[in-house]
Amino acid sequence: MDYLIIIVTGMVGATLTFYVSAQLKQGRVRASALLSLLVSLFFYFFPEVLNDFLTKSIPMVFIGTSFIGMVTSSAKTSYVRLAVAGGLFSIVYLNKSQFFDGYGGALGALAFIALLTTLTFSELLLRKTKFLAGVAMLKKFFSRTNP
Amino acid sequence: MVAFLVLIQLILLFITLKEKVEADSLAAVGLIALIMLTILCGSRYLEWHHKEYTYEKIAVAIWIPVGAVMCYALNSYVGLGSVMSAGIVGTVASFLPEINRKSAYLKKMPPAIYCGAFIGMSSMAVAPSIGFMLAASMLSGVIYILSKNLFLGMGGKLGTMAFGGVILVSLINWLV
C-alpha cells in the first residue's frame, strides 16, 4: 500500500507542477519550489499523520517529480506522459541505490532519467505506429493496382 | 557535454543495477537495463538540442553558488531538511523577476539559484563544508554554461547538472 501511495504521489507531483507552471503561468521554478515547500511544510507540522516511511519519502518523491513537471510545454509532452514519467520516477526511486543518498541533485538526475525514458518510449511507439500505418497504406495501394 | 550528462545518469543507474544484480532482483534488473538502453537511444537519436551551440553567461551562472550556500545553510545549520530548504530558496528566487519585469537578466536568475539549491540539498556526510559547496557549485556552473542549448525544456536538467558537480567534487575529494 505504501508503494502505491508513493507511485500516486509521483504522478500527482509531475502533473500538478506542470499544471501550475504551464496552465496557471506561475513559471517552472515557482511551480516546483512552492508546491514542494507546501508538501514539506505539511509533513513538518504533521509528522504523525502517516507512517515514518511515507513521512520521509513523500516530500522527496514530490520534489523529485516536480522536476519532471518543470518540462516546457513545447517538449512534446502531455499530462499522460508526465503521469507515466512520475510513476516511473517513483519505481526507480524505490529501487535506487543507497549509495547516492545525501547527494544533492540525485533526485533531479532521476527525474531526468524518468522523463527522458518516457518521452523516448512514446516517440518510438509513435514512430512505429506511423511506420505500421504507412506499410498498411502501401499494402492497400498495391492490392488495388494488382488485383 | 551531452555525453557527460548521459554518463552521469548511466553511472547512477549502473550502481543501482549492480546492487540489484547482487540482490538477485530480476524484475528491477530488467527495468533498469531497459531504462539504460532507452536513455542511450533517446539521447542519441531524438532531437532534444538546438542546432546552434551557444553558452550561458557567467553573470547568470554566478548565482548557482548563492543558491547552494543558502540552501545548505538552511538544510544543515538551521535543520529545516533538504526539501523545505530547496523549496524556500526556489520560491524566493522565483519572485526575483518581479523586481523588474522587463529585465532579461532577472528572469534568468531563478533557474540558476534553484540549480544551486539542488547542490545545497546534499547531506553533511556528503558535503561536509561550505568549501565543498562552493567547489561543487563552480563545477555545476561550468556545466550550466556549456549546456545552455542541450536537452531544451527537459525537466530534471538542472538537477542533473547539480548532481554532476557534486559527484565530480566527491570524486576529486576521494582521489586526493
Image (spheres, grey):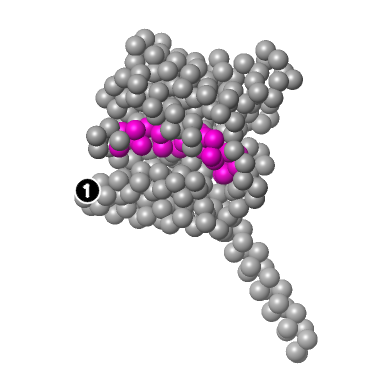
**Residue B56 vs residue A61, the one in the foreground:** B56
Q: Residues within 10 Å of mark 1 (few under 14, many from 20)?
A: few
* Residue indicated by mark 1: B23
Secondary structure state at the residue bearing disc 1: loop
Q: Chain of mark 1?
A: B
Residue A81: which quarter of the image?
A: top right
Q: On screen, B164 above or below A51? A: below
Q: Quadrant of residue B34?
A: bottom left
Picture layout, residue A116 above or below residue A16: below
| Residue name at image x 37 percent, y 55 percent | B33
Q: From this viewpoint, which residue is outermost toward the bottom?
A: A147
What stretch of residues is rendered in magenta?
Answer: B144-171
Residue A106 inside the magenta-drawn segment: no
Residue B150, how many percent across, how many down? 57, 44
Residue at position x 41%, y 34% in the image:
B165
Residue B13: where, in percent of width, then height? 36, 46
Query: Principal SS element in the magenta part?
Result: helix
Depth check, front residue: B35 or B106: B106
Q: Position of residue B166 (x, y in %)?
A: 37, 32
In the image, is B22 to the left or to the right of A20? Answer: left
B59 horizontally vs B142: left or right = right
**Is residue A52 visible from the viewing direction of this image?**
no
